[in-house]
Image: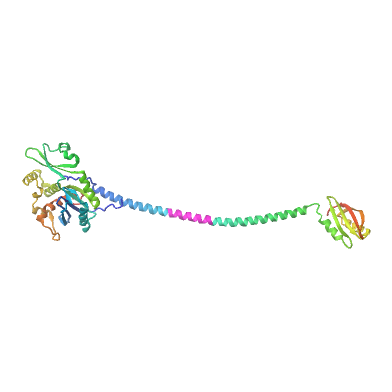
Amino acid sequence: MEPINFLTTLSVQELRSITQWHRFSIFFIGIVSVGMLIIQLQQLQTLYDLHHKQKSMKSVDATTIKNYMNLKEQELRATTKINLLNERISYQNDPSPYLRVLQEFQAGNIRLVSCTLTQHTITLTLLVPDSRSITLFAQKIGKTGLFKGLKLVSLNPHKSQLLGTLKGSLQGPK
Amino acid sequence: MWSLPKLSTNIVTISLNPQSLTCCWIEKNEHSQLILRSYKQTLFSNLECASSIIFNPTLLKQHIQDFLYSHQLTDAFVCMSCSGPQIMESTVTLTHASPNADDFKFPKLKKMIWDYRYLYPQENGHAAFYICGISRHLLLQYQLLALSVPYNLILLTTERMALLRLYHHFYGSAFRAGQLAVEMNQYNHDMHEIFSLESLKRMLIIPATVSLSLQKEKNYLLTHLGLFITGGDLYGAN
């Protein structure tokens, strides 16, 4: 005789299956959680490493860029200087050789008052004691080969001395 | 979800009637003999369970918890029987032995959870059926009691159903419905009287450690024995 049961219950097999499934679910959830945790930790470690590396790379770059900028600035300054020098060297109407010669031959009582250089001509104003001194001076500088056709264009008394003007053309350094 | 109870092969039987609550732990030994491990009866004095309706669930819960915890039987299967005015029980005679549910014309049953079982044939060719039912709110009360303790309630039936199952078990393959009819009529359908004290002693070993008056507790022990056998049939513990 099958008993009357007011309850609708699960069979023992179903109960045991549920229990086993419950245990397996907990075990499986545990395993999956641990697995996910391990993977996440690895990814976090990688992220941390990358972040750290990026940080260190940033600081190296900043120093390098600073050094590079300094070097670049130095190079620019040096290049400017070199260009200036090259410009000076390559300058055709450089008055320095003429002035050097004038300074070299300016001796005794001869005193250079003014010197006007144009592209091809030179006008010298000299304060000399006598007319002979200015003539000799003109001959001396004429022998250097830098000047050509130097002529005394004026000679005026100035206090106790004479103010003479020489005019000629420039020949350029050889 | 996480507190899914463990499954145990132990069966605890609880019998609830308006007079008392009895809890019993029966075990089967290696020789397939049934041994009474523990028995506890609590008499109601303050209408804790009047007319089968539980009026003091806290007290009932406390008694059941005490019994289960004291014997570490919290994971055991629990079979419960109830009886009282609110439990509808009847023996019905029908003209044929294989009726449908519609053949039982009881208006009361419409509001109940009920079932019937064939008992025996009658001399006039009719068939006697045992019919029992419980109202839904009462069933819910018993289920809530089981949830509040908590215990694995697997069977809720009537005392008479438990005794009918015991009768079947007692006779085994020698069971005859005609014999049941004779004995039922002889004892005016009082199933307890069918079993003598000697029969109970043959079915159940009561150790000396369990102190009880066998004569006084015979009816309860028979019910518990029937519940244990029914529970064992259901869950393969026997």
- Residue A65 in sight from this viewpoint: yes
Quadrant of the rendering where the C terminus of chain A is positioned: bottom right
Q: How many marks?
A: 0
In percent of width and height, residue A4 lies at 17, 45
In the image, is residue B232 part of the stretch drawn in magenta?
A: no
User: Start and end of the magenta stretch?
Assistant: A40-55
Q: Relative to A79, is B113 above or below?
A: above
Q: Residue furthest front?
A: B46
- Residue B31 in sight from this viewpoint: no
Considering the whole magenta stretch, tell me its main secondary structure: helix
Residue A30 is left or right of residue B178, and the answer is right
Q: How is the image coloured?
A: rainbow
Quadrant of the rendering where the N terminus of chain A is positioned: top left
Please give the name of the residue rendered at 32% of the width and 51% of the height, measured from the top-left corner: A24
Residue B90 placement: quadrant: top left
In the image, is residue A52 part of the stretch drawn in magenta?
A: yes
Residue A158 placement: quadrant: bottom right
In percent of width and height, residue B33 lies at 15, 55
In percent of width and height, residue A107 lies at 87, 62
Please give the name of the residue rendered at 13% of the width and 55% of the height, measured from the top-left corner: B204
Q: Relative to B177, is B71 above or below?
A: below
Residue A157 placement: quadrant: bottom right
In percent of width and height, residue B213 lies at 11, 57
